[in-house]
Image (spheres, rainbow, N blue to C red):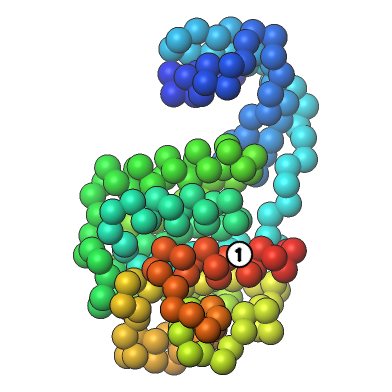
Amino acid sequence: MTLGPREARHLHVLRLRVGDVLRVFDGQGAEAGAEIMELEAGHAVLILGAAVSGAAETPFPLTLAVALLKGDKLSDVVRAATELGVARVQLLVTARADAREIGAQKLMRLQRVAEEASKQSRRAVVPEVLTPIALADFCWDGQLFVAQPGSAGRIMNLLDWSAPVNVLTGPEGGLTDAEVAGLIERGAYEVTLGPRILRAETAPVALLGAIAAAGE
């Protein structure tokens, strides 16, 4: 197995040397042991060993749908979401979103953030970060939970892993009443994140953390 400059640089950062043993993964759940045979500045050669069992994933895919946020907030959300087990991140354009679109380069950066977070957390799956779509165009399989201040719904009382699970959080300023009503009409559930109003970059982490704490 030959690695290019970026992955070879990562091995150097980890202070690994020829003969060291490590684990490699394909980003889709497969994981194996490997030994470094060559390690140069621009490439590395590994000999693959036997497949190994990685950390368990959720019974069905977990999707985070999150409104576009400004600055580096999306990077923070993608990083934490990867650690907390999402299979994909769907970016959304909502009425109060901080941005209406993101460029191809930023989307690529977000995907790299997901890759780096998978490595750091020793997860064999890299979530896909999907191009932004309008909230009205967002479709889902299974359950959708929408974080909404003042809701009486509790995600742990509603969560059912017999199908895919989706969670959705809004921008600074929240989703509009019309947006929430439209999602509920399509089968979504409103859920609370506690008595306080959370920042837009905190809400998805809190919601995913509650799911992760369930131990699935």
Question: Which residue bears the numbered disc 1?
Answer: 209
Q: In this view, does 43 lie to the left or right of 100?
A: right
Vertical placement of residue 215 versus 55, above or below: below
Residue 28 seen in this snapshot: no
| Amino acid on which the number 1 mark rests in the picture | Gly
Of residues 83 and 39, the one drawn nearer to the viewer in this rendering = 83
Vertical placement of residue 139 versus 208, above or below: below
Give how far across and how far down residue 55 sits, in percent: 73, 47
Residue 173 seen in this snapshot: yes
Quadrant in the picture for residue 141: bottom right
Vertical placement of residue 197 versus 12, above or below: below
> Tag 1: Cα neighbours inside 10 Å, few (<14), some, or many (≥20)?
some
- Please report the residue visible at 51 percent of the width from the left and 72 percent of the height from the top: 167
- Please report the residue visible at 38 percent of the width from the left and 47 percent of the height from the top: 110
Vertical placement of residue 22 versus 94, above or below: above
Of residues 58 and 169, the one drawn nearer to the viewer in this rendering = 169
Q: Quadrant of the N terminus?
A: top right
- Please report the residue visible at 64 percent of the width from the left and 13 percent of the height from the top: 36
Give how far across and how far down residue 133 sits, in percent: 31, 66
Q: Is mark 1 on a helix, strand or loop?
A: helix
Of residues 94 and 207, the one drawn nearer to the viewer in this rendering = 207
- Please report the residue visible at 23 percent of the width from the left and 63 percent of the height from the top: 99
Q: How many labels does the image show?
A: 1
Give how far across and how far down residue 72 sits, in percent: 33, 51
Quadrant in the picture for residue 45: top right
Give how far across and how far down residue 216 sits, in percent: 73, 64
Q: Is residue 90 left or right of residue 104?
A: right
